[in-house]
Every structure is written in structure tokens, then in C-alpha cells.
Image (cartoon, rainbow, N blue to C red):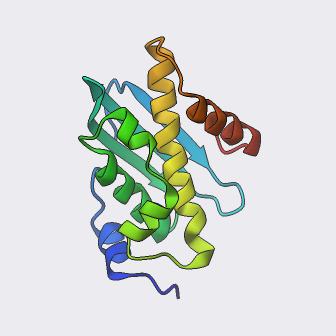
Amino acid sequence: MMNYSKIVLKHFRNPHNLGKITKPDGVGEVGNMACGDVMRLYIKVKDDRIEDIKFETYGCAAAIATSSAVTDMAKGKTLDEVLKLDYEQVIKDLGGLPPIKVHCSLLAIDALDEAIYEYLVKNKREIPRDLEIKHQKILTRGRH
């Protein structure tokens, strides 16, 4: 059995922002073929802020917990603030993850980045260089 922090177990047992947004402004979908985790993250954006965010995740306790934590971290923040989030902040926010589950925090950040990427593309907005590089890496890894 994995040694999860109390915070991870709390998010797993009672995930925040679980569900789907009707008519989202952006959707990020990523997966990991090795472990079978799949994350889909939906965003609604108003005045360059994440007004609403929800997720659907098929995966282990860590996958669900990281999805829940990322939505909490992003909600209400500007797109620029959200794009600065990284997997290490997710791990810290959750009180740690077992090394074998760190990839779940990467997936959650990737899903968030992909949702923002889709929003920017749909709205014919400039894609920040760092986001374009992340997007291309996600495509190359086949996690999209």
C-alpha cells in the first residue's frame, strides 16, 4: 500500500471541482500509457482569470488528488499566474507524493497547460513561448 499524506487522501476521498463544464473555454486532456491514468481538465475564463475549473480523471488515488489540487491552485488566478504553476508546487501542496507517483503531478500540470493552450488558440491569442514548448513536448511524448 502507498504511503500517502493525509492531504492526498483527503483530496482522493473528497475531490474538489470534480465534474465537467458545459461549453468550456478550454479542455486539456492527457494520459500516461504506462500507468493508464487519463486526465481531462475543463476551464472557463473571464477577464483572463480562471473563473471555473473542473476535472474528470481515471486513475489512482494520486492522479485524482493531483487533479483536485491543481484545480484548487488555479481557480480564481490569472492565466499568467496559472502558467507559472509547476509539478513541484502540486507535490508541496499535497504534503508530498511517493516517488513512483510524481508523474501524476506532471500530468495534472500538463492537463492545465493544455486547457489554457486550447483556450488561447480558440480565441486567436498569442501563445507564450514557454507554453508552446510545453505543448510540443506533450505532443511528442504522446500524452495528449
User: In which quadrant of the rendered view does residue 68 lie?
Assistant: bottom left
| Residue 77 percent across, percent down from the top left | 28, 40
Looking at the image, residue 23 sits to the left or right of residue 29; the answer is left
Looking at the image, residue 76 sits to the left or right of residue 132; the answer is left
Q: Residue furthest top?
A: 124
Q: Which of 114 and 64 is in front in this view?
A: 114
Q: Residue furthest right?
A: 140
Q: Is residue 47 above or below residue 27?
A: above
Q: Can residue 18 be seen in this view?
A: no
Q: How many marks?
A: 0
| Residue 26 percent across, percent down from the top left | 42, 28
Q: Is residue 88 above or below residue 17?
A: below
Q: In this view, does 78 lie above or below 100?
A: above
Give the residue displayed 39% in from the left and 35% down from the top: 80
Give the residue displayed 38% in from the left and 76% down from the top: 95
User: In which quadrant of the rendered view does residue 91 lie?
Assistant: bottom left
Location of the C terminus by quadrant is top right
Q: Can residue 123 be seen in this view?
A: yes
Give the residue displayed 39% in from the left and 42% down from the top: 82
Looking at the image, residue 16 sits to the left or right of residue 121; the answer is left
| Residue 16 percent across, percent down from the top left | 27, 56
Give the residue displayed 43% in from the left and 61% down from the top: 89
Q: In this view, does 67 lie above or below 113?
A: below
| Residue 51 percent across, percent down from the top left | 24, 34
